[in-house]
Image: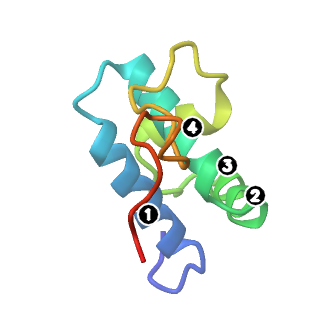
Amino acid sequence: MSAADPNQKLVRMANQIAAFFRSYPEDEAVAGIHKHIVAFWTPRMRDQLGAQAGRADHGLDPLVVTALTDVPRAKSPIPDAVTDPQESGLGASDAG
């Protein structure tokens, strides 16, 4: 991957996600990476990263490539975020 590659930032970000999940079992790491990319990346970013993965010099962590190409077999080790405090038993907000 050359320094002028427009996908360099996406590759770096995807590899940082893989580094975070590296300590988990491989199937959970792949599921976590997949979940994060689907949840937080725009369709355009995902398409660009998928195209990058198809290049011989993609520069992507193997866990990222697997997360992009295989259907995750495990559940992500990171639980879904809860946005409503009442759903998590915290009651009403006392902010403001």
Q: Residues within 10 Å of mark 3 (few under 14, many from 20)?
A: few
Tag 2 and tag 3, C-beta contact below 8 Å: no
The residue that disc 4 covers is 34
Q: Residues within 10 Å of mark 1 (few under 14, many from 20)?
A: few
Kind of residue indicated by mark 2: Asp
Q: Which mark is residue 54?
A: 3
The residue that disc 2 covers is 47
Foreground mark, 4 or 2, reads 4
Residue at image coords 63%, 49%: 39
Kind of residue indicated by mark 3: Gly
Kind of residue indicated by mark 1: Met
Residue 48 location, quadrant: bottom right
Kind of residue indicated by mark 4: His
Q: Position of residue 36 (x, y in %)?
A: 53, 46
Residue at image coords 34%, 56%: 16
The residue that disc 1 covers is 13
Q: Position of residue 73 (x, y in %)?
A: 57, 13
Rounded to the nearest angstrom, the CA distance separating label 4 from label 2 is 13 Å
Q: Secondary structure at mark 1?
A: helix
